[in-house]
Every structure is written in structure tokens, then in C-alpha cells.
Amino acid sequence: MRLVVANLRKLIRRPASYVTLALVAALLVLVYASLIITARVSTDPSAALATRSIITFPNAWVTVLELILGVASFLALAFAGAVAGSEWSWGTLKAAVARGESRGGYQVSMLVGVVIAIIVGLLVLYLVGLVISIVGAFVLGQSLDAVTDPDGFGALPEALARSSLALTLYASFGYAVATVARSQIAGIAVAIGVYFVEGIGRFFASEILQWSPFGAAEAVTSAGGEVSIGTGPGAVTLHQLGDPLAAIVTAIWIVVAVVVTIAFTQRAEIGG
């Protein structure tokens, strides 16, 4: 716990923590602005109604999280990779080991600190999203009576838990890749590259890649099962793990990432 608190203090002082949070917040504002404009100017009543339901209550209690994850997932990868890579390039891991800290214990404590920072950031962004949803309701002339809808608010705890689990996977994966690469740039590039390649690959081999790290994490925050994209002959069906299998597979991948991080750090040469 002492190391976790110490590493959290280091993360608070890092500009990257605030830059990442500000970047996601800016992207979230842009997404909401585009949705609000679409809802106001759309000439298709059904499309306008669907857009309004996304950004207004009671659905907004949960859709805010979905929109945040849409822009935050790969940034969580990048942030964790940047922190892990800096442990090698800045020599902080070597300094910790030199003063008697356990290699594995230090790395796990730093990863826990990263995950806590990301989840705190998620909560901050969630509050930002709620404020924007309220503003959007005023702009669109929607009543705020649905804010107190028990069904919408009641789904929030589970949605937050699912989102936190998914972001923990992204952070763990990014941290593990950057640790093996021992580099911020290489770690971030590889982690984000795998993220996008896997996303594209699921269009062609979703039955296999539904078991992959990001495929499982995505299933955790969605309904799971089959997802159809498009209509007609060109429609694509993506397979996703259902509950509770998606959560179990995601947890297993988190453990794998942590084990890889510890194993590599234990065997790596950090002297010099």
C-alpha cells in the first residue's frame, strides 16, 4: 500500500496524467456536440429520436460511459504504456530496486496506481458527460424529469463496474507491452497497433478473436452475443462472448498481463 500511494503521488505530478484526461474530455465534448447538432438538424424523425435518446436521460446514465469508453480505451493503453516505459528510460525502477524494493512488487504497485488513476479519470469524465447531457437536454428542449428514472440510474453501478474492468485490461496490456519493450514509444506504438489490428481482424475472424484481450473487454461493456453491422448481403456478424464468460476471460487476460510484467522485470537487466 505504501508503494501504491507513493506511485500515485508520482502520477499526480506527471503532466501526461492531465494531458490524457484533457484530451479525452475534449474528444467527449466534440462527440456530444456532433450528436446534439445531428439531433437538432436531422430531417429524419427516427434518426433524430435515436440520437436524442443517446444523449438525454434516462439512457444518458449509461450511454455517457459508452461514449467515454469509445474515446478513452486506446488512450488508457497509451497512458499505461507511457508510465511503464518511463520506469526504464527514467531509471526510476532501477532506483527503487537499489533501495531494496522488490522488482515485482514495485511494478505491481505502479500498475495498481495507474489503474486507480484511470478509474478516477473515468469518474471525472463521467461527471463531465452528465453535465453535457443536461446541457444537451436544455438545447434540445427535453425534460429533465427522466433524470430520476430508477431504471436508468439503477443500471449505473453495474455499468461502472464493467467499464472499470475493461479499462483495467487496457491499462494492464499497455503496461505489459511497454515493460517488455522497455520503451515508452515502442510500447505505446505496439499496444495501440495491436488494438487497431485486432479491431479490424474481428471483422474477418470474430469467432476466434472474441477470445482476445480487447475482444473480451469490449464484450464486457456491451450486450455480448452476436452483433450485426450493416444490412443486406454486405452485413457483417461479429461474435462476442456473453456474460459472465466475457468478464472471466477479461480477468484472465489481466492476470496474464500482470504475470508477464512481473516475469520480465524479474529477469531483465536493470543495472548500469
Image (cartoon, helix red, strand yellow):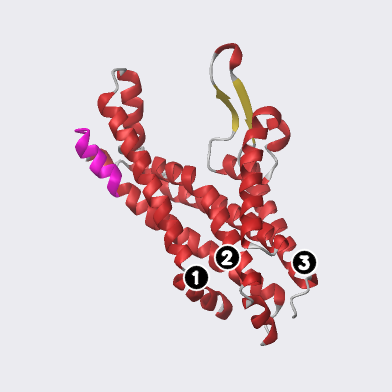
Q: Main secondary structure of the magenta part?
A: helix
Rendered image: mark on residue 83: 2
Q: Which residue is mark 3?
A: 263
Is residue 69 or residue 187 the one in the foreground?
187
Q: Which residue is mark 1?
A: 11
| Magenta stretch: includes residue 56 | no
Dot 2 or dot 1, earlier in sequence: 1
Q: Are marks 2 and 1 in contact (CB under 8 Å)?
A: yes
Residue at the image position 48 percent from the left and 59 percent from the top: 119
Which residues lie in the magenta part? 131-143
Q: What amino acid is labelled 1 in the image?
A: Leu
Q: What amino acid is labelled 3 in the image?
A: Ala
For residue 106, say whether it is visible.
yes
Q: Position of residue 166 (x, y in %)?
A: 56, 50
**Left or right of 73, for residue 105:** right
How many neighbours does mark 2 have within 10 angstroms: few (below 14), some (14-19), or many (20 or more)? many
Residue at the image position 62 percent from the left and 61 percent from the top: 184
Dot 3 or dot 1, earlier in sequence: 1
Q: Position of residue 62 (x, y in %)?
A: 41, 42
Q: In 3D space, how far apart are the residues under numbered discs 3 and 1 (Cα atoms)?
A: 24 Å
Q: Position of residue 112 (x, y in %)?
A: 58, 67
Residue at the image position 64 percent from the left and 45 percent from the top: 193
